[in-house]
Amino acid sequence: MAFSMQNYGIQSMLKEGHKHLSGLEEAVLKNIDACKQLSTITRTSLGPDGMNKMVINHLDKLFVTNDAATIVNELEVQHPAAKILVLAGKAQQEEIGDGANLTISFAGELLQNAEELIRTGLHPSEIISGYTKAISKTIEVLEELVEKGSESMDVRDKEQVVTRMKAAVASKQYGLEDILSSLIADACIQVCPKNPANFDVDNVRVVKLVGGGLHNCMVIRGMVLKGDAVGSIKHVEKAKVAVFVSGVDSSATETKGTVLIHSAEQLENYAKTEEAKVEELIKAVADSGAKIIVSGGAVGEMALHFCERYKLMVLKISSKFELRRFCRTTGTAALLKLSQPKPDDLGFIDSVSVEEIGGSRVTVVRSEEGGNKVATVVLRGSTDSILDDLERAVDDGVNTYKAMCRDSRIVPGAAATEIELARRLKEFSFKEIGLDQYAIAKFAESFELVPRTLSENAGLNPMDIISKLYEKHASGNTKVGIDLRGGDSEDGVCKDVSTMNIWDLYVTKFFALKYAADAACTVLRVDQIIMAKPAGGPARRDQPAGMDED
């Protein structure tokens, strides 16, 4: 007789195949460990000397980058606690567009310090309470560190924009930040609306063309479309534009119909009427004053023939999103069918020309005058992965511009802010009574992650640099940071950031630290993990060689 043992406790309550982890050892410390592993991956990519990661995703696409947001997106993290850190990084990327690495690495450091406190006997609730007090104090101190006079800025002044943008671009492309910041600032200022708070990131486009180098990059007022013009006309200046969404062709009838043809004469007349109809439509467009036709679909042979006859330039844009941007750039109303456009439906372009850049033919649509809506940064580089990384740097720069349009305050960069926060929080922890003070002290210690990582990634001695920074800050110079290019002056690598002109945006730091503390507290609050059995049948095994599917 088979003897089946009855499950008891939580086992009897849940379906078989589930996993249940609880308690300090199984749940809390395992969660912290997973988060530590994730932050170890991103940490070495922090700062200008950050190392690149080579990530190959499930579609076999290769990414070579030091951009934390891209890395964690492509890693497909499975662990539920580590996913919380990934979400914090994504929130930072969407809110500010920069600082995702600081968010993930700082949260990992907070959790690592929390683990030490747990092992010494503190309860997670006491640590959370201390961390909550610490982040409130951090935000208070951060506001005091804001550079005087940075509250107001002219977002159309290139020099002020580059100052605030340089640090974000340098963290992705160290050494190229001067060239890139200048390009990005030009593009952003061109499309900045009357009210800068309404700045739209989507209005700065990026086109990547393999070949050439960074000195060949340029900003074009208007759009750059990959691909050639359809007809033989390749250059038009100061022309009106008509956009047709469904293509330029003789359209079929709405209903099905049968035409009976009895003689050759009727067949000839039928062909002629079709021809005449297409000519009539194209002539109507030409008569409206349009010199350029843009099609969202196919361009028929016959329609193209008549466009050539009436000296109309024909462009084809397959992507509906690109077509919308084109309409926005030129101020055109898109028409559904090929028909005579009204004067209000037509847009205006300064020049359209087909140019050859690095072996690929592109159509450059310039719209210099009037309210310019879209600017395009043309990036050149030797390989696709270099171009992808340059594009990420441009995205970071544009997002930083959007953030500074809302809040232009700046704080010292190059780890000066972090060291000052660490010093002030340590002092604050001494004034606290109760077990919270240990958590606040550890929170303060976590800020050392930034100078330590910047030094390690640059191959410098972190202990020596951190102690020098503390010494300078204690003597009242709160703007001393790490100069990674320095080391030959009497100050060594510790210099005043205002002389080096390295500034970070206040909002970037504010949200990065806030999201990191929130994520760390969320992970610490978890004391049980209950995972149901994953849905789906057994995994399909690989077939032995020579076997068919059946």
Image (cartoon, rainbow, N blue to C red):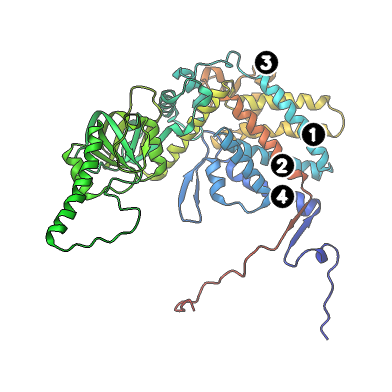
| Residue topped by disc 3 | 476
Q: Which mark is residue 111?
A: 2
Of mark 1 and mark 2, the one earlier in the sequence is: 2
Q: Quadrant of the N terminus?
A: bottom right
Mark 3 vs mark 4: give the one in front.
4
Q: Are marks 4 and 2 in contact (CB under 8 Å)?
A: no
Residue at mark 1 to residue at mark 4: CA–CA distance? 20 Å
Residue designated by label 1: 130
What residue is shown at x 30% (from left), y 40% (from top)? 339
Q: Where is residue 160? Give x, y as percent.
A: 49, 18
First reached walking from the N terminus: tag 2 or tag 3? 2
Position of residue 520 in the picture relative to residue 285 (left or right)? right
Q: Mark 1 or 3, which is nearer the eye? A: 1
Mark 1 Cα within 10 Å, few/some/many (few <14, many 20+)?
Answer: many
Identify the amino acid type marked 1.
Answer: Gly
Q: Amino acid at mark 2?
A: Leu
- Amino acid type for the residue under numbered disc 4: Asn
Residue 175 point in image, percent of width and height: 44, 30
